[in-house]
Image (spheres, rainbow, N blue to C red):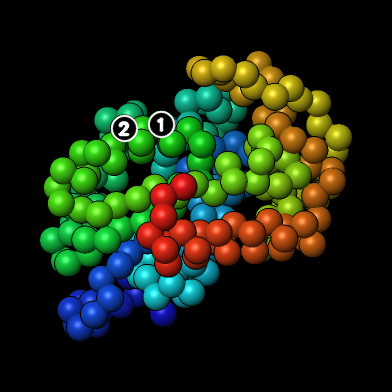
Amino acid sequence: MTSLSEKTWYEVEEMKNKKVIIPIGSIEQHGPHLPLCTDSLLVERIAEEVGERTDCLVTPTICFGISEEHMDFKGTLTLSQDSFKGMVFDICTSLQRHGFSRQYIINYHGGNKKYLIELIPKIKEMGIDVSLHRVLGRLGKFDHAGEVETSLMFYLFPERVRKDKIERFQYKIPEGNGWRTKDYSETGVIGDAIDASAGRGKQYFDKIVNELVDEIQNDQYR
C-alpha cells in the first residue's frame, strides 16, 4: 500500500524509506467527452503505479492547479499563483517535518509547470531534496483532451469517457505564452480524439510510468 493517507501514524513512524511522491493535477475542461477531473484522475493512477515500483509513499493528489487558459469553459477551477505555490510549499514542508526529505513532484497539468519551477528553489532552501517530473510533455506532442489523453482515459477509466461525444474536433496548436484555449478550439479539445484507443493508452501509460520509475530510481530530474 503506497497511499500516505491510508496509513496510520504508527505505520508512518515505523517507515525506514522516507521517500514520497506528490501528484499534482487540475480541475479544468476537457472538451465534451472527458470529465473536468481528467488530469487529476490520470496523475493519481500514474503516481500509484510509480509508487508501487519505487517503494515511495504517495500523497493525496493536489487536484487544483492554475488553469486560467481554460476559464472560458464552464466548470474549470483555477487558483492564483500565490495560493497554488503556498499550498504546494506547505505540503512539502509538512512532509519534511515528518522525515520525508526526499520528495518527487509529478505534475500533470502544463499550466502548473512554470509556477512549480519558480517554487522549487524556495522549497530547496528549506533543506528539502525535491525534484519536479512532468507527464505529458515527454510524449512529444501537444494534447489537451485529444488522442493522448483520451487514449489514457480509455485505458484507465473507460467508464468516464462520453464516447458518443467524440468527433473530428477542429483546433489549432497554441503558440507562444498567455494563450487562451477558446482562441484555438471552440470545444476545448486540442488534438485528434477520434483516433484514441485503449491500446494506445496502455502504450502511453507504460512509457510514462517506466520513464518516471527510471528517473526516481536514479534520482534524475527531467
For residue 208, what is the image quadrant? bottom right
The answer to whether the residue labelled 1 contacts the one labelled 2, judged by CB atoms less than 8 Å apart, is yes
* Quadrant occupied by the N terminus: bottom left
SS category of the residue bearing label 2 = helix
Judge whether residue 159 can be spotted in this image. Answer: no
SS category of the residue bearing label 1 = helix
Residue 149 relative to residue 21: left or right: right
For residue 146, what is the image quadrant? top right
**Percent position (x, y) of residue 215?**
46, 59
**Percent position (x, y) of residue 20?**
32, 64
Q: CA distance from mark 1 to mark 2?
A: 6 Å
Judge whether residue 196 can be spotted in this image. Answer: yes
For residue 81, what is the image quadrant? top left
Q: Residue at x 80, y 38 (%)?
A: 192
- Numbered tag placed on residue 196 in the rendering: none
**Percent position (x, y) of residue 213?**
50, 65
Residue 208 relative to residue 187: left or right: left
In this picture, is 201 found above or below 136?
below
- Numbered tag placed on residue 114 in the rendering: 1
Q: Residues within 10 Å of mark 2 (few under 14, many from 20)?
A: few
Q: Residue at x 70, y 24 (%)?
A: 173
Disc 2 designates what residue? 118
Which of the two residues, 189 or 52, is positioned nearer the viewer here?
A: 52
**Percent position (x, y) of residue 195?**
84, 46
Q: Residue at x 58, y 42 (%)?
A: 137
Residue 188 relative to residue 110: left or right: right
* Amino acid type at image mark 2: Glu
In this picture, is 9 found above or below 135?
below
* Amino acid type at image mark 1: Lys
Q: Residue at x 72, y 60 (%)?
A: 203
